[in-house]
Image (tube, rainbow, N blue to C red):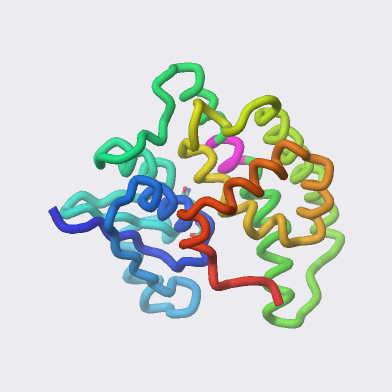
Amino acid sequence: MPDPILYGPQFSTYVRSARLALEEKGIAYRLDEIDIFGDPKAKVAHLARHPFGKIPAFEHGDFALYETSAIMRYVDEAFPGPRLQPSDAQERARMNQVFGIIDCYAYPSWTTGIIIPRFRAARTGVAADESAIEEVVPRARRCVNILDKFLNGREYFAGEGVSLADLHLAPMCFYFAQLPEGKRLFGHAANLTRWWTEMSARPSLVKTTPALTRK
Ligand SMILES: N[C@@H](CCC(=O)N[C@@H](CS)C(=O)NCC(=O)O)C(=O)O
């Protein structure tokens, strides 16, 4: 079987989540940084891999997959290496719950509501819509507080070691913790701050640090 291929630019949080699973398992893979944001032809061609036009997409031989959580679970289950999902049913349920929180509540508030407008403003020089950002802050705060509570008295979100939940959340924290809103909210979340400090030092995170940083 050939090495798996992950499609998507390195700066994408979802692409990085899938990469982190591959890195933590110690799997050789190829990252194909298709430019769906800058190249209209690449965007159209990508629809053959992902009918919703999102990133990442994944291939392992003739097996093709999209949706980050499915890719991460497949990577954990199909390859040797450290297990990234707890065997205990309740711990695994907690991991799955954190996935739901990330995808349904944290991504829309942190990433769509704050990270993307702030980074776009830094790149283009056009001011962000501050009132739109302020409006989303309470939802972003709720996510921070809930995730912080989950880490009360424990090192990782689920199980004894790092799990897919930690690896899915970390890429978003990389961007959010650089921004004024993220700094402010993380300032009231000691568990999440401690967790993020430890996660950001892991070799898999260091190796996949996005080239895109805020000017
Ligand atoms: N449900 C998808 C969401 C992936 C997603 O939203 N990816 C973003 C980048 S981080 C994307 O493709 N954005 C491009 C767009 O929305 O056009 C998954 O879990 O993989």
Q: Inspect the magenta stretch and tell me whether residue 84 lies in it.
A: no
In the rendered image of this protein, does residue 121 appear above or below residue 84?
below
The answer to whether residue 196 is left or right of residue 92 is right
Q: Quadrant of the C terminus?
A: bottom right
Q: Nearer the viewer, residue 64 or 164?
A: 164
- Residue projecting furthest to the left: 1
- Provide residue 113's location: percent of width, then percent of height: 71, 56
- Provide residue 174's location: percent of width, then percent of height: 63, 57
Q: Nearer the viewer, residue 130 or 17?
A: 17
Q: Nearer the viewer, residue 6 or 36?
A: 6
How many tags in the picture? 0
- Residue projecting furthest to the bottom: 125
In the rendered image of this protein, does residue 189 appear above or below residue 111?
above
Residue sitting at 56 percent across and 43 percent down?
A: 103
The answer to whether residue 67 is left or right of residue 49 is right
Q: Main structural element of the magenta stretch: helix, strand or loop?
A: helix
Residue sitting at 46 percent across and 39 percent down?
A: 164
Query: Based on the displayed image, in which of its 4 quarters is residue 152 positioned?
Result: top right
In the rendered image of this protein, does residue 210 appear above or below residue 172?
below
- Provide residue 132's location: percent of width, then percent of height: 81, 59
The answer to whether residue 148 is left or right of residue 170 is right
The answer to whether residue 70 is left or right of residue 63 is right
Q: Inspect the magenta stretch and tell me whether residue 102 lies in it.
A: yes
In the rendered image of this protein, does residue 175 appear above or below residue 186?
below
Residue sitting at 76 percent across and 61 percent down?
A: 179
**Magenta segment, which residues?**
99-104
- Provide residue 212's location: percent of width, then percent of height: 58, 72
Query: Based on the displayed image, in which of its 4 quarters is residue 156 positioned?
Result: top right
Residue sitting at 43 percent across and 26 percent down?
A: 86
